[in-house]
């Protein structure tokens, strides 16, 4: 069965700091990869996704993620975070066979003004 | 555009009582999902519908959980009887398309936070 690991449970940064949130998955076949975000008091929403092509994917609000197949990773990055980026971030993997979206446990990001 | 609507927003019940959650997906979305999110964890799929057919219910605890999606639009998720361990947020999501194109972008509701005392 596929699994998703997000090693950072809580990350605290100051505004303008650079961000990298780790995501590793366990599945050897074709995968589709996602990052979802949940802002305080709001519902989960898609931040970006990777299906094929360029492994560097750009999403909304200046976020990007890089798919590194050899490392089974899909880390989320942002060069300069803002206070409004405070949210919980979830990595998710969709495998080719199960077609079931599996979420990681999430990383709470707190950005200090 | 109206999003995925769920009700109630909060529910507090005593153990062994029944409880039901309701979801209205985005208009035109063929696929509907019920997820459970325990505290400090990511959402876990309970059941996925394509139109009115449950195509993946492998994670649904069928001894106490049931779901239906009559007419392929609204859906209800029921727990009877509820146990202490059922306390969680129950999320509904919908997506456009079915089969190979499903799961490409899920739209989530705000969830129902269930507390079983």
Image: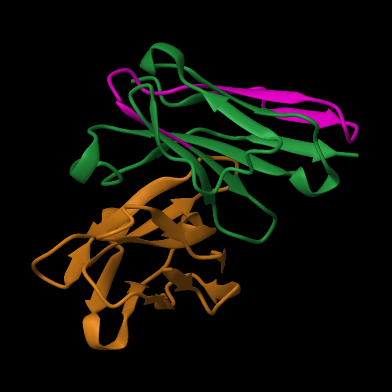
Looking at the figure, which quarter contains the N terminus of chain B? top left
Asked if residue A86 is among those painted magenta in the image, a careful observer would answer no
Residue A96 horizontal side relative to residue A104, left or right: left
| A80 to the left or right of B17 | left
Q: The orange chain is which one?
A: A
> Could you tell me residue B92's position as x and y percent?
50, 34
Residue at the image point whose x is 20% and y is 65% from the top = A57
Q: Position of residue A4 (x, y in %)?
A: 45, 70
Residue lying farthest to the front in this orientation:
B63
Find residue B29 and report its horizontal and vertical position in percent. 30, 25
The answer to whether one can see residue A94 in this image is: yes
- Which residues are the magenta region? B6-33
Colour displayed for chain B in the image of the structure: green
On screen, residue B69 above or below B71 = below
Foreground: B59 or B97?
A: B59
Place of residue A30 in the rendered image (x, y in percent of width and height, measured from the top left): 21, 68
* Front-lying residue, A17 or A70: A70
Classify A54 as above or below B89: below
Tell me the residue at 66%/42% (across/down): B89
């Amino acid at each position: 069965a596929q699994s998703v690991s997000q090693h950072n449970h809580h990350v605290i940064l100051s505004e303008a700091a650079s961000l990298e949130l780790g995501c590793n998955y366990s599945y050897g076949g074709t995968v589709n990869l996602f990052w979802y975000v949940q802002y305080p008091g709001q519902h989960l929403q898609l931040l970006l996704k990777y299906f094929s092509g360029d492994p560097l994917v750009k999403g909304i609000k200046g976020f990007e993620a890089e798919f590194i197949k050899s490392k089974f990773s899909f880390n989320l990055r942002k060069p300069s975070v803002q206070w409004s980026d405070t949210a919980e971030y979830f990595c998710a993997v969709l495998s080719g066979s199960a077609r079931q979206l599996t979420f990681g446990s999430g990383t709470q990001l707190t950005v200090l003004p | 555009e109206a999003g995925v609507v769920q009700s109630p927003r909060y529910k507090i019940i005593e153990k062994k009582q029944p409880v039901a959650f309701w979801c209205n997906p985005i208009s035109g979305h063929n696929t509907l999902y019920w997820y459970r999110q325990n505290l400090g964890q990511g959402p876990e799929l309970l059941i996925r519908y394509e139109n009115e057919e449950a195509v993946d219910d492998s994670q649904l605890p069928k001894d106490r959980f049931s779901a239906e999606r009559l007419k392929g639009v609204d859906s209800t998720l029921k727990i009877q009887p509820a146990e202490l361990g059922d306390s969680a947020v129950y999320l509904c999501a919908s997506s456009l398309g079915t089969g190979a194109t499903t799961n490409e972008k899920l739209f989530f509701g705000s969830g129902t936070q269930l507390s079983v005392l």
